[in-house]
Image: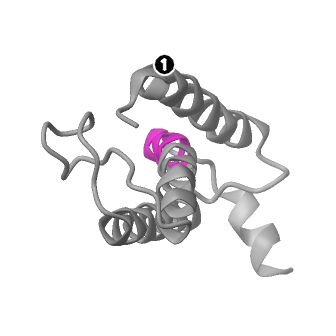
Amino acid sequence: MTKTDKMLEKPMKWYHYMEGFLAGVFLTNGVPHFVNGVSGNPFPSPFSNPPGQGLSSPLVNVLWAIFNLLAGYLLFRASRINSKRKLGLFLFFVGILLISIFSSIVFVDKAK
């Protein structure tokens, strides 16, 4: 019996689903910060003034992106999501969808 088979025998608890959802949120949130940061473009971050509206430096955005990607990876690993657990995978993608829609609304009027 493989490690994956043993893992599938154990039912997922509620917090595994929450970790999967948050993994999608954090991984997706890291993308625009990373892309803008490595492109040398200022972009809003929680550390700008005012938070989320002003522009942060590219270095701050790269560091914020790395934090988001690391947190998302750790949450994804802890969530025990895989292709056989459909609800967990569904919630992972719901997290991606919701943060994508939220970001597109919030950043439509970002300072240029």
The residue shown at (50%, 43%) is 25
Q: Is residue 32 left or right of residue 54?
A: right
Q: Is residue 24 above or below residue 34?
A: above
Residue located beneath label 1 in the image:
105
Q: Nearer the viewer, residue 73 or 30?
A: 30
Q: Nearer the viewer, residue 93 or 79?
A: 93
Q: Magenta segment range?
A: 14-22
The residue shown at (47%, 51%) is 26
Disc 1 marks a residue whose amino acid type is: Ile
Residue, far bottom: 2
Q: Position of residue 70 (x, y in %)?
A: 46, 71
Q: Is residue 6 above or below residue 95?
A: below
Q: Position of residue 67 (x, y in %)?
A: 37, 68
Q: Position of residue 80 (x, y in %)?
A: 62, 59
The crowd level at tag 1 (other Cα within 10 Å; few <14, some 14-19, many 20+) is few
Q: Is residue 19 left or right of residue 98?
A: left
Q: Is residue 99 above or below residue 20?
A: above
Q: Is residue 35 above or below residue 22?
A: below
The residue shown at (50%, 56%) is 30
Q: Is residue 18 magenta?
A: yes
Q: Is residue 63 left or right of residue 22?
A: left
Q: Position of residue 110 (x, y in %)?
A: 39, 30
